[in-house]
Amino acid sequence: MKFIPNSSLKQEMLKELGLKQIDDLFIDIPKEIRIDNLESPIPSKGLSQQETERLLREIANKNKSCNDLLCFLGGGVKPHYIPAIVKSIVSRAEFYTAYTPYQPEASQGFLQAMFEYQSMIAELTGMDVANASLYDGATALGEAALMCARITKKNSFIIPKNISHSKKSILNNYVKGPGVKVKEVDYDKKTGKIDIKKLRTVVDDNTMGVYIENPNFFGVFEDDVNEINDVVKDANALFVVGVDPISLGITKPPGDYNADVVIGEGRCLGNPMDYGGSSLGIFACKKEYLRQIPGRVVGLTKDKDGKRAFCMALQTREQHIRRGRATSNICTNEGLNALAAAVFLSWLGGIGLENLSRINFEKGQKLAEEIESINGFEKLFSGVHFNEFVVKCPIDPVKINQKLLKRNIQGGLVLGEQFPHLRNCMLFGVTELHSDEDIKRLVSALKEVT
Amino acid sequence: MKFIPNSSLKQEMLKELGLKQIDDLFIDIPKEIRIDNLESPIPSKGLSQQETERLLREIANKNKSCNDLLCFLGGGVKPHYIPAIVKSIVSRAEFYTAYTPYQPEASQGFLQAMFEYQSMIAELTGMDVANASLYDGATALGEAALMCARITKKNSFIIPKNISHSKKSILNNYVKGPGVKVKEVDYDKKTGKIDIKKLRTVVDDNTMGVYIENPNFFGVFEDDVNEINDVVKDANALFVVGVDPISLGITKPPGDYNADVVIGEGRCLGNPMDYGGSSLGIFACKKEYLRQIPGRVVGLTKDKDGKRAFCMALQTREQHIRRGRATSNICTNEGLNALAAAVFLSWLGGIGLENLSRINFEKGQKLAEEIESINGFEKLFSGVHFNEFVVKCPIDPVKINQKLLKRNIQGGLVLGEQFPHLRNCMLFGVTELHSDEDIKRLVSALKEVT
Amino acid sequence: MYHSAVYDEPLLNEFTEVKKEKTLRIEGIPKSLQRIKEIGIPNLDETQVARHFHHLSQMNYGVDNGIYPLGSCTMKYNPKLCEQIASWDKFANTHPYQDISTVQGNLQIMFELERMLCELTGMDYFCLQPAAGAHGELLGMLLTRAYHEHRKDFERNEVILPDTAHGTNPASATMAGFKLIEIPSNKDGTVDLDILEKTLSDKTACFMLTNPNTLGIFESDILEISKMVHKAGALLYYDGANMNAIMGKARPGDMGFDILHLNLHKTFSTPHGGGGPGSGPVGVKIKLERFLPVPRIGRTREGVYIFDDAPESIGKIKDFYGNFSVLLKAYIYILMMGDEGLREASEVAVLNSNYMKKKILDSKKYDMPYKQLRKHEFVISCERLKQEKQVTAKDVAKRLLDHGLHPPTIYFPLIVKEALMIEPTETESKKDLDKYVETLVKIADEKPETLRNAPSNTPVKRVDEVTATKNPVLTWKMMS
Amino acid sequence: MYHSAVYDEPLLNEFTEVKKEKTLRIEGIPKSLQRIKEIGIPNLDETQVARHFHHLSQMNYGVDNGIYPLGSCTMKYNPKLCEQIASWDKFANTHPYQDISTVQGNLQIMFELERMLCELTGMDYFCLQPAAGAHGELLGMLLTRAYHEHRKDFERNEVILPDTAHGTNPASATMAGFKLIEIPSNKDGTVDLDILEKTLSDKTACFMLTNPNTLGIFESDILEISKMVHKAGALLYYDGANMNAIMGKARPGDMGFDILHLNLHKTFSTPHGGGGPGSGPVGVKIKLERFLPVPRIGRTREGVYIFDDAPESIGKIKDFYGNFSVLLKAYIYILMMGDEGLREASEVAVLNSNYMKKKILDSKKYDMPYKQLRKHEFVISCERLKQEKQVTAKDVAKRLLDHGLHPPTIYFPLIVKEALMIEPTETESKKDLDKYVETLVKIADEKPETLRNAPSNTPVKRVDEVTATKNPVLTWKMMS
Ligand SMILES: Cc1ncc(COP(=O)(O)O)c(C=O)c1O
Ligand SMILES: Cc1ncc(COP(=O)(O)O)c(C=O)c1O
């Protein structure tokens, strides 16, 4: 089964073209570069579906999933519960086998769902508008910085020192084009929050935007948001806030503290961890920046008979129309993951999300308490945290993790690689999926291995 | 989430009914038998979806699937490959959440698929017509016997001694109503085939039908079908043949040897083993018995504008119309499993089925050879077998299986329980899913444990 | 305005085949059995197959499409989680003959499900084998036989049932060899105690009843009935298809029923699959236990699940242990609902039903014979429409299809003329109930022609069912 | 006659809410961050949610609905097996920071996929991070910068591209800080060598090209072009969106390209998901290897997969390792196809395209500018229809929708007036190609009004896209 229904009609069709053989269709390729076949590692003959499934099962068995392994990794990605309905909707072929909705009349389903996604993201973040997704949270930061540059025509962008190295790297690559300078502000070594005094010294006339994360990479809530906003607005810069959408169930939407742009990683809204794939870049902002938004947006309109309808809006910002002067080069985004988020959020509802958020917060507090109660472990920062937190360990955290692994536990994220001065620290993460017994299991294992 | 959207509107709705409380709706239930609540093992409060999933995962982990375990069980059920497309079609909500297609205009999809299922079953068995499914292969035998009784008005039904005990028991329960006598014919101890001489002595004027299985319960092909048919027809009885549909890829359809009714278990056509559930009773017969068929059939017709359409046909045979005089009491059948079979067969195609059948036959021969080459093991019957066969073991087969299990292998079916004189025998089964390495693994384990 | 998807979808054998290489000739098959004919199943590409069934699916109405108030069928929403779990490898891919130590999870589920069903119904023991309601009835009738035969009460060959009984009841009883006696309902639509009394005798094996009955009316005299039946030496059988009316409110066991079946594919939200697989577990009182099919699922003191034999068992009614995945889904559903949820389900099922009933009757377009208070379903009549406008229940049903609404069951129970049997279930929202009522009312005022020409927003217009039976064409081959 | 499903589906916030108990007040959140506003997401029941999205899905066209010949998008059938495997727990439920010993399967897949793509394209190294084609282009441009900067060639700030280039090409180049120079195509629709020669200079960083180009024409002068570009000290970039034309027939690496991206969600049959997730792996020649993003996936002598660092790497372009499930599906697809299958896929994609092209041109209703032989796609013009009947490419597209056929890409590439860009792919059957051509031909003869009023068999009639942009309403809140 090669998914080529005309396999046996080739001669007949060639005849209609007045040709003899398939290669007559390829005479425009210079002889010197024509090849006869592909070699290893591409198999010469394809595998049957049965063989393929068997082979892949063998490969899969070299993995341990987070159901095989009790996982306490922090660092942005965490296992979250995905209700069955999400899979059952996103696996509807009408959705997952569709292209970008260029023909609105044949794509009302996806378009309405995206409109609803945008609406819910706007509700959640307290922003006026949201787009229909970007690649991931990190590239959303890149696009946010570029938007700040377009709007303010200034050239320095400020970020906290404590964001993931990967995000930093991506941001730097995104702003290389316009030559934006990225400056870092250190965090308060006691609280783990951004150091506002230092922020004040870094902000200047060239500052186009200031980015903070809430909760930040250390899991700590940035609660001085009003002060930060004042600093940003005094500099005529834009306030960009990165969020964990789950935390918004119990915390103020950044719109309430006057953020201009809200971004975040939305994978946790109904998408699997997928080894870091299945990402979803959330992007929301105030209405006034609407025409500067990167990526697709879906808008409400009417059909010829006046019936409610949806279509892509503001396409004139986009590459297929504006080409070199588009607000972004993005074309394919993360549509299906946004759909999953829409199903997830509507299944949960506002109250459900609030509950989920509360449970995550409470599990975060509980795990921290339990770990702190172990000899030699210490929560590093005094700031209130959500569902992740940094712990100072009595011995090399790499060793701890190795020993935990033997007990089928994946410990926290070792921070030494990204933050050398935190070499003896780990970032633990916990969610609604961790039962009290799971936490007990980790705690007694930690006791055993130290 | 209790799947009760009006949960919060109860008071409002009661008011419209002029009632005060829910219990006012239940005043017609005598007080003495009204209850307030249900008790253990029904939990008083329902579990959340997350809790449910976790609990079920724990229970599931008490099982080993045939992917965890290398399984060589014969006895009718065997693991077969199910292409992904089957699941992707039968999990379309339009199909699996539908009821029996009482309103043809809203059910053309299912009806056409059933028409196609019937067509393919008819093609496969060489019969004129097939119904839209019965519960399973065993109840199909019961229904076949009842149909023979209706048609011939006689009262003795003949079966081979070597069919599964469970099938025998079900048959006996099905024919208790009309008081049909079930007589058994022994098999030839050398070949494992039905003993035709004995058959001749059992058949008489009261014989309404003769049932054989091909391949039979021991996996052996009944190749004297023409002779058997002669015996049956001489007695003015009906010839009923039970098949493994996969074997029909390379063997003659029973229609070619003049069978009157063909039945079988169709689970293997795209349905999972499901611990013996997900069964599919195949029922096909000659056109002349059409109005005596049990169960639903779908027929071709036209709509008011003359457009091709499908609907349930011959409903006048069925219980909802004919009530006590229906051809069967069956109402709900195995629709979705028949749909899976239709998708499976159309994915495979005639040539694909032939291939699949051949592979099963070849694996059957290969495994038998390999096992026979082990000291002390012996293939019991000389008849040609398909993908199952009986092996005489050098030690107690129950012990063999226990030892195999320690090696994560599920050995063959121990026959002693069903056939006491075969106490030292096992029925091995093998399919396209067993690779040569799997077979090697079994063989070397068998060597080790004996 | 609603419209169903419409495709002019060819039959599989009308597609262009993708010819594949013919398989190799094979050796070793006995000559008399070698296949000579090619197998008449077209050889297609996966793309063709996928689209074909995709198109067909869109021309099929299921619960996920909308309200499906087929009376007597309890078409409620099927939680997605049940589907997902039932497809797990560790369940779906277990072999029924596997060593029992490797399927303890399966056995635990069946063991616990049996006990949950006992608690729910007030019965003592359950058998999960039957594949559907009718199959459960047959088992029930066989148990009835076994019971009387065991007591050497060989003359009891009659089964009594009310004229409101579902067709499978009489069919199952005859299938098990009983003579049928149908008794007419009284003016309230319930069992006429006098007639029942007169009909009961020492030939009566069993009285079959569903409660609430198929009119949706609770048989308030049930304790009386039970007494009468038992006094006559007969058994009382409960058709559990209507269990969705009374979960957590009352139990058939407490009413005096001796045997019952449930429809897991109705009350317990397991999907109906367009006609199955279903599951019709049978519950019995202790006096019938010994006859239940084998194997019985037991548990040792150590908590190991085992199969028990039973020497007086009638044997088996279905291969293996029933439609396992359906059992599993029902088990999950019960866990998710709990006592509270199940009870509320029945309460709201009854509330929704009475709410709709009232709204429809308020419109004065349809009539409802018999008592007012209904349980989870109710039956109204279009007889007045027929008299006044020559519009039938069928016409009304077909017109509903044009609005994307699935019609009720029609022409059942037989004692109501031009019957519409409506069972909304608890999973419908008030908004959808209101819309349904509105549409029914509007339809009653439409031109008779509009109704008789309905439906038109469906893949095909009104289907000629008579020809399909008069001149049956059931396969591709019969088409030519 | 085809009709799409139509539901008057409310928005989620227009449903009746199922009010749930409010959550408990929680302690410990810093005062300034406590949420005060309720979250404006409605609280619904699963039934409502399931039906809502079910209805929406039926109002959406995907490859499983039928032919989807969007030029430049390679909308081919997506094998179901890929979907199934990608959802296995052992893949879907792995954390990107898990200990490397517990994800050897994932790493093996990525390691092998990189090498497969190398073999397929003739490149030396691959990076799987980019989430889409445009993302790959951006990475390609950043690599171009890094390359020239590393050579201290700081003046190269121009990127040249033909006027047929896809919009993402110029957008990515500017995003990476380059100046754009667009050059006109020659009369054959291919690169004008003279103009290219003149445009190349020591300021040229890169020439971006797709081959076959967006007209579906193979740039036969590619070796010449490559020589010129390299002589000028610039790099040659390949937009791999059109790779479906040449798999197993020719390789960009052999043509002289230095950098390329592929679209796994096109050529490799991973579904497009209504707009992603996608994957746009980038391949490079050895001279660019050192700049590739980290982590690089390596394998030790013992066969253990590891992450390698690279000191001169430009860093990262996406968090973690790319859209893993998309990579996995492409890997499975390549395994199932093999050399034979991939080659045949390209062969039949080209055959189908030329077959359709001929049939359409034979009808004389549409014109095709430029060369005759096309690869996997071709572009025809409705200009004549516009002149004669004031019927536009858009009108034709909308009318196709009435037949249940997805229209081609329209108005691209920009150099063809009233363009219809048709890419059938290899997964369409001759029957469906014939039907498509027939319909296109029939449409050309229909009354202009019929076309301008199309579509009418869709959930909505022609959509007013202008208002959506003039007066943007993007959320529930903006509606009021
Ligand atoms: C009242 C009643 N009894 C029995 C049955 C038979 O159940 P099944 O269809 O599962 O065989 C039904 C189903 O239609 C029913 O409604
Ligand atoms: C020729 C060409 N290049 C680049 C792209 C961009 O790819 P993506 O949408 O994956 O970003 C496309 C997709 O439309 C394309 O057709």
Image (cartoon, coloured by chain):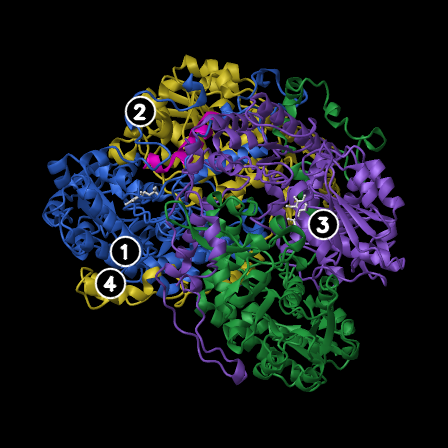
Chain colours: A green, B yellow, C blue, D purple
Please name the residue that numbered disc 3 is placed on: A59
| Residue C465 in the image, given as x and y percentages of width and height | 30, 28
Percent position (x, y) of residue C264? 38, 50
Callout 1 amino acid:
Ala
- Whether residue C161 appears in magenta in the rendering, the answer is no
Q: Residues within 10 Å of mark 4 (few under 14, many from 20)?
A: many
Separation (CA) of disc 3 from disc 2: 54 Å
Q: With B368 as the anchor, is B135 left or right in this view? A: left
The reply to whether the residue tagged 4 has its Cβ within 8 angstroms of ligand 1 is: no
Write down the chain letter for disc 1: C
* C-alpha gap between disc 2 and disc 4: 45 Å
Q: Tell me whether marks 3 and 2 sit on the same chain.
A: no
Contact between marks 1 and 3 (CB within 8 A): the answer is no
Task: State which region is magenta.
Answer: B103-120
Per the image, label 3 sits on a secondary structure element best described as helix
Q: Which residue is mark 2?
A: C469
Residue C235 relative to residue D138: left or right: left
Callout 4: SS: helix
- Amino acid type, callout 4: Met
Disc 1: which residue: C245
Q: Earlier in the sequence, mark 2 or mark 1?
A: 1
Q: Which residue corresponds to mark 4? A: B13
Q: CA distance from mark 4 to mark 3?
A: 57 Å
Specify whether residue B110 is painted magenta: yes
Ligand 1 closer than 8 Å to label 1 CB: no
Look at the image and tell me in which quarter the C terminus of chain D lies: bottom left
Quarter where residue D253 is shown: top right
Residue at the spot x=47%, y=16% of the render? B258
